[in-house]
């Protein structure tokens, strides 16, 4: 079986949204299938793709437009908007295309190219935000893309519900799938016994729009947190807000309590030094940082986004803020602080819960789901994605 993978990621070379499809591609290659990829062209091939190349995957770089708008418009009139995608399909000859959508606003022209070429496809959505709505001029195109998909996959039911409301599409038959994690299945880093100060880590790219580190800094600037023995370290690459983050740390005079740890390859070393995770995201899919912290027996303090409420029992295996506001994140952090001497026990509860509620082999599970999507389905078992009505209806 030849499976094509198309990633919509644009603004960065790699991210958490790319982990599932790439790991599933590796699993498919190990199982004897063939994989071909189309990924946004970079100066250097992301190192995360190198294992796929070594295993024989075919990678086709997707070029960005290097010429002016008038020329692009002229070319669109002269040839199909799917010209380059159809050219790729003719060369790759895939039996199925998996479209990995890093964010629900991403362009889905590739889905229409699949339809034109007669190739079945699936759509995997990694993140959907309730704060951005599809433009009216693009809504019908997006709805059609989901309606024509053989399968739709989401990493959380919440994300599926957000997209249903956004587009007016019935996605009730979409499958909820698990994200991979970058720690050992039996990870159990030693508990850091020193508690002066207590240490929390925020593991996420520094991107205020999604990860809301700005809210976290506003919480930490309060006098009560300045006076308590609590240290916060951010671990993650620059997602576009690093300069603002540094400016706020200086403005709020938080240099003694808020540290910048940068990106770390071995995440288990982070949890060997910290007592818990704090992740005040405005929106999420199924954050790897939360899964990894829980796998390592660390207490999560998170907002009620993505899979949080499905995996965490509030006040038992972690602490959940209803939304990413200063007041609500402060409340969750305060509840956690009052029970700080129980953090090791709460972390142990988290480790048990995540192993019961989350797949321990998500990449292979998703690879199997992709193969299943290529097989004919019994007619009576089909429950196609349905469009609830024309956007432009009166």
Image (tube, grey):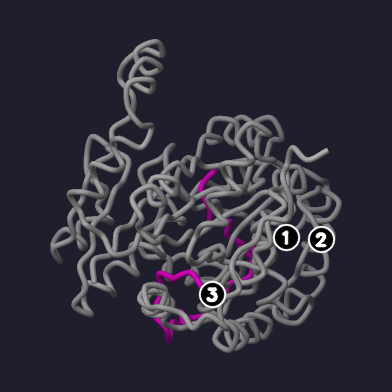
Q: Is residue 184 magenta?
A: yes
361 vs 217: above or below: below
Residue 322 got which mark?
2
CA separation in Å, label 2 and label 3 = 29 Å
Q: Is disc 2 placed on a helix, strand or loop? A: loop
CA separation in Å, label 1 and label 3 = 25 Å
Residue 254 in the image, given as x and y percentages of width and height = 67, 41
Judge from the rendering whether residue 266 lies leftward or rightward of residue 212; answer left or right.
Answer: left
Q: Are marks 1 and 3 in contact (CB under 8 Å)?
A: no
CA separation in Å, label 2 and label 1 = 6 Å
Q: Are marks 2 and 1 in contact (CB under 8 Å)?
A: yes
User: In which quadrant will I find the C terminus?
Assistant: top right
In the image, 326 versus 50, the foreground residue is 50
- Residue 360 sits in quarter: bottom left
Label 1: how many Cα within 10 Å (few below 14, some 14–19, many 20+): many
Residue 303 got which mark?
1
116 vs 152: above or below: above
Range of residues picked out in magenta: 178-206
Label 3: how many Cα within 10 Å (few below 14, some 14–19, many 20+): some
Q: Is disc 1 placed on a helix, strand or loop? A: strand
The residue to which callout 3 is attached is 192
Assign the magenta stretch its main secondary structure: loop
Name which of mark 2 and mark 3 comes first in the sequence. 3
In the image, 211 versus 376, the foreground residue is 376
Label 2: how many Cα within 10 Å (few below 14, some 14–19, many 20+): some
Between circles 1 and 3, the one closer to the viewer is 1
User: In which quadrant will I find the N terminus?
Assistant: bottom left
343 vs 161: above or below: below
């Amino acid at each position: 079986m030849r499976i094509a993978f198309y990633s919509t990621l644009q603004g960065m070379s790699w991210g958490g949204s790319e982990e599932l499809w790439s790991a599933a591609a590796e699993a498919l290659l190990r199982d004897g299938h063939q994989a071909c990829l189309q990924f946004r062209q970079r100066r250097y091939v992301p190192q995360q793709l190198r294992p796929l190349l070594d295993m024989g995957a075919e990678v086709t770089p997707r070029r960005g437009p290097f010429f002016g708008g008038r020329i692009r418009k002229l070319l669109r009139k002269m040839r199909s908007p799917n010209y380059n995608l159809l050219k790729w399909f003719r060369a790759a000859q895939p039996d199925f295309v998996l479209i990995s959508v890093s964010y629900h606003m991403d362009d889905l022209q590739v889905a229409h190219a699949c339809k034109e070429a007669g190739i079945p496809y699936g759509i995997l959505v990694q993140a959907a935000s309730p704060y951005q709505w599809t433009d009216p001029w693009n809504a019908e195109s997006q709805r059609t893309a989901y309606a024509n998909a053989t399968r739709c996959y989401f990493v959380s039911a919440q994300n599926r519900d957000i997209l249903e409301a956004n587009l007016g599409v019935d996605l009730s038959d979409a499958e909820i799938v698990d994200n991979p994690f970058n720690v050992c299945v039996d990870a159990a880093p030693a508990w850091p016994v020193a508690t002066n100060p207590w240490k929390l880590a925020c593991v996420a790219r520094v991107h205020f729009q999604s990860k809301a580190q700005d809210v976290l800094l506003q919480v930490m600037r309060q006098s009560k947190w300045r006076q308590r023995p609590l240290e916060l370290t951010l671990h993650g690459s620059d997602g576009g807000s690093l300069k603002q983050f540094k400016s706020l740390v200086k403005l709020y005079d938080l240099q003694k309590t808020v540290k910048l740890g940068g990106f770390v390859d071995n995440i288990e070393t982070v949890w060997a030094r910290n007592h818990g995770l704090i992740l005040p995201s405005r929106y999420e899919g199924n954050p790897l940082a939360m899964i990894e912290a829980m796998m390592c027996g660390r207490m999560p303090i998170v907002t009620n986004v993505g899979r949080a409420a499905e995996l965490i029992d509030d006040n038992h295996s972690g602490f959940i803020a209803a939304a990413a506001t200063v007041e609500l994140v402060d409340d969750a952090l305060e509840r956690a602080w009052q029970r700080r001497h129980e953090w090791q026990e709460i972390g142990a509860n988290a480790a048990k819960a995540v192993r019961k509620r989350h797949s321990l082999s998500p990449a292979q599970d998703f690879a199997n789901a992709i193969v299943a999507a290529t097989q004919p389905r019994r007619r009576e078992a089909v429950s196609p994605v349905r469009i609830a009505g024309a956007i432009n209806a009166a």
